[in-house]
């Protein structure tokens, strides 16, 4: 009895248990150290996960490689999510090197600049299809390839969304439609892959100054409006998103799937 008490005391005085110890995760969508995917990767690594990273092109390879190396990542591979060949190649390398996978983080979106700047009614067919392919279908495509590696031990998929999926946010336009599709894909995948023991969730993050947000008209105004109206009266950091992701990626969230989890200082619950 005394021995048990002292063991408990010893455990309690240690730093918190590592939530992702021994888990392997794939991170798609790091552009730089301000990316939401980077915030998630850093917190996953801090909690013991081994990570693999992808990059879209040579310019991004130069930015992702040092970041991945700083988290001791053994796998850094090219992946254009629009290319079945590249996605197949990515998962065959992961299968070869790791043999299994515990989680995938999808933090990828794109709409043609014109389709965010012009009237929504003027959205082109090509622009519409491209935005939905990159921002929503890519999650389904990754889920399909990841499934054989996730299923044996049960794993999970996480994507990033935004409130523009649900309400009209000025200038978000076509991306709102793409995020609405993405959130519906989260629910469909959760229902489809649940019987395989695979969970699928999204984090809907408040606006953050990232590469994806750079050059967006009135972004400063959007941030100051958000900060003034959000119940917590502050902006969201990539560390805030990383912390919430840690829970969803870990076994703490073993009963959670199909969820769109807001990390937005409460902004979405407010009206006016
Ligand atoms: O999902 C996003 C951004 C996604 C995005 C951004 C761009 C900018 C450059 C997708 N495609 C492009 N294409 C480009 O050519 N966010 C949640 C960040 C964001 O973007 C906004 C926002 C917020 C917030 C656009 C308008 C209004 C608010």
Image (cartoon, grey):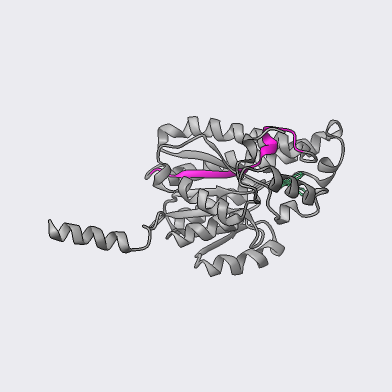
Tell me the magenta residue range.
154-169
| Foreground pick, 93 / 147 | 147
| Foreground pick, 83 / 120 | 120
Image quadrant holding the N terminus, namely bottom left
Vertical comparison of 198 with 1: above or below: above
Q: Position of residue 219 (x, y in %)?
A: 78, 49
Q: Position of residue 98 (x, y in %)?
A: 43, 57
Q: Residue at x 43, y 42 (%)?
A: 253
Question: Is-magenta flag for residue 167?
Answer: yes
Q: Residue at x 54, y 54 (%)?
A: 242
Q: Position of residue 210 (x, y in %)?
A: 70, 55
Please state if 222 lies on the left or on the right of 144 as rendered: right
Q: Residue at x 78, y 37 (%)?
A: 173
Question: Is-magenta flag for residue 266?
Answer: no
| Foreground pick, 165 / 181 | 165
Image quadrant holding the C terminus, namely top right
Q: Position of residue 203 (x, y in %)?
A: 57, 43
Please state if 181 lies on the left or on the right of 151 as rendered: right
Q: Residue at x 56, y 56 (%)?
A: 239
| Foreground pick, 262 / 50 | 262
Q: Quadrant of residue 260?
A: top right
Number of numbered labels in the structure image: 0
């Amino acid at each position: 009895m005394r021995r048990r008490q002292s063991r408990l005391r010893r455990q309690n005085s240690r730093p918190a248990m590592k939530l992702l110890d021994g888990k392997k995760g794939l991170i798609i969508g790091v552009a730089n150290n301000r990316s939401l995917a980077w915030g998630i990767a850093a917190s996953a690594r801090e909690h013991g996960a081994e990570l693999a990273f992808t990059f879209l092109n040579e310019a991004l390879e130069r930015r992702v490689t040092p970041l991945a190396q700083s988290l001791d990542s053994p796998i850094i591979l090219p992946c254009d999510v629009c290319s079945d060949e590249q996605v197949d190649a990515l998962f065959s390398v992961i299968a070869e090197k790791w043999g299994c996978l515990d989680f995938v983080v999808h933090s990828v979106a794109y709409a043609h600049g014109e389709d965010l700047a012009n009237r929504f009614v003027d959205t082109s067919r090509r622009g519409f299809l491209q935005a939905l392919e990159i921002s929503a279908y890519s999650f389904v495509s990754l889920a399909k390839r990841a499934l054989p590696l996730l299923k044996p031990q049960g794993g999970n998929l996480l994507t990033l969304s935004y409130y523009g999926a649900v309400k009209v946010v000025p200038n978000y336009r076509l991306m709102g439609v793409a995020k609405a599709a993405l959130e519906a894909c989260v629910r469909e995948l959760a229902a489809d892959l649940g019987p395989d023991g695979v969970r699928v969730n999204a984090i809907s993050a408040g606006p953050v100054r990232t590469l994806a947000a750079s050059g967006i008209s009135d972004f400063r105004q959007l941030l100051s409006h958000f900060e003034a109206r959000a119940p917590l009266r502050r902006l969201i950091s990539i560390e805030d998103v990383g912390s919430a992701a840690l829970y969803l990626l870990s076994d703490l969230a073993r009963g959670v799937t199909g969820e769109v989890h807001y990390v937005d200082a409460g902004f979405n619950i407010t009206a006016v």
